[in-house]
Amino acid sequence: MPTPSSFAIAGAGLAGSLLAWRLLETANRPIRVTLFEKGDLSQPRSAAYTAAAMISPLSEVVVSERAIYDMGMHSLQLWPKWLSTLNQHSAKPVLYNNQGSLVVAHPSDESELEQFAQDLRYHLGDSNTAQWLNRNELTTYEPDLNPHFNRGLLLPDEAFLDNRQLLHNLHQRIIALGGSIQDNTSITFTPEPQREGRPLAGYDCTIDARGTGAKQSQAVRGVRGEVLWVQTPEVTLKHAVRLMHPRYKLYIVPKPNNSFIVGATEIESQDSSPVSVQSMMELCSALYTLNPAFAEARIIELDANLRPSYMDNMPAITWHKSGNSVSINGLYRHGYLLAPHLIENLLGQLS
Ligand SMILES: Cc1cc2nc3c(=O)[nH]c(=O)nc-3n(C[C@H](O)[C@H](O)[C@H](O)COP(=O)(O)OP(=O)(O)OC[C@H]3O[C@@H](n4cnc5c(N)ncnc54)[C@H](O)[C@@H]3O)c2cc1C
């Protein structure tokens, strides 16, 4: 394929929006980019919008392939540079916190924490940067955590960002750079790209970034995740915190306006119906044990969504036979962890 100069991208979630922006921001020749989104952007339904947006290569290496860690460490280098560029042009910058995450366990579950630390040593060897914190150090790092935690692990090479602001700023910047976004517009691949049953003409290259929306034409499945948003001025957290527990592993990530996103569940199900009572009870009770002041927090949102995943839970960039269309999918629970690495890789193939 000659170097393309016009791009149609299907899906304005994480992969599609980041790709559209990077194409426009880094172009050294005139290009045309249109981002098509099936849903209404005023009511986003992408996994990218639901996500907690942790960038956590260490936490993931114990349950994933080593390649996920390597790609994640590369993304961890790219995010601050990319956000610095994006923030220069945005009315409200995207919050990016790279102070690391904390992992704790209640005294009765400390074997879970020890096992996690051993797994990290096993998978990372000399690259393991995790540090043990004693009770006093833990209190210094995170004064609002329940003081009954005897110790914790600091994972310095981890970050999180404000994903909803990111998506908003990306879409604004795409338009400012001359790109166009058409929401309420579904693109199908049969395998040629079609819009409302007609061939999508006029583009040199079409990119399928539909996440679980691609499951009719690709072997993509959805893996359900449920999250709870709470808001309280009574608790301040500076880090993403993970709570090790024999049955479920909870994470809590601070978000703007005294709010927090809390999640735990990963369910092998394509069901994107609302959060179950059991999940909510587990999330709330675990949250309460991190700091009893969460009892007075207000539940401001409950959300469930599907993570787009291939059978091996690895991401893939796949060129279609026609040679001028390509899919990027399978980001699973690693979209924020892996997207910059994958987008940079795809940009290299498109230039
Ligand atoms: C509860 C939860 C928590 C998560 N937490 C994290 C985390 O902490 N860290 C992390 O790295 N990852 C996390 N993830 C995973 C991350 O959100 C996904 O990996 C990522 O969003 C996948 O990006 P994507 O662009 O492939 O899909 P999406 O973000 O889902 O975007 C796909 C877009 O395509 C659109 N679309 C679908 N069909 C069509 C069509 N026919 N035509 C046009 N558009 C279409 C959809 O409406 C959607 O907007 C989490 C996911 C969930 C559900």
Image: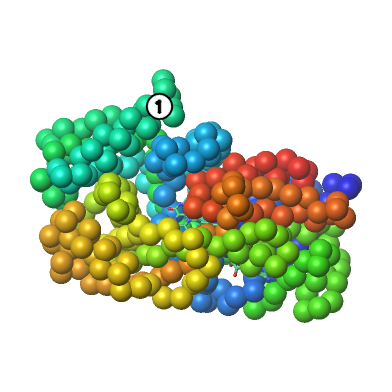
Task: Measuring from the top left, give residue 123's x and y in whole percent.
Answer: 44, 29
Dot 1 lies on which element? helix
Q: Nearest the camera: 256 or 68?
A: 68
- Decide if residue 175 is in sight here: no
Residue 65 location, x and y as percent?
Answer: 53, 38
Q: Where 59 falls versus 52 (above or below)?
A: above
**Quadrant assignment, res 101:** top left
Q: Is label 1 within 8 A of ligand 1 (CB to nearest ligand atom)?
A: no
- Figure coloring: rainbow
Taking the spot 54% from the left edge, 53% from the top edge, the residue there is 332
Residue 267 x %, y %: 44, 61
The answer to whether residue 159 is visible is yes
Which residue is labeled 1 in the image?
A: 122
* Front residue (pair 27, 223): 223
Residue occupying the point 78% across, 74% down = 195
Q: Position of residue 303 (x, y in %)?
A: 40, 70
Direction from residue 154 to residue 337 in the image, left or right: right
Name the residue: 20% across, 68% down.
Answer: 297
Please tell me in which quadrant of the rendered image residue 71 appears: top right
What's under tag 1, amino acid-wise? Tyr
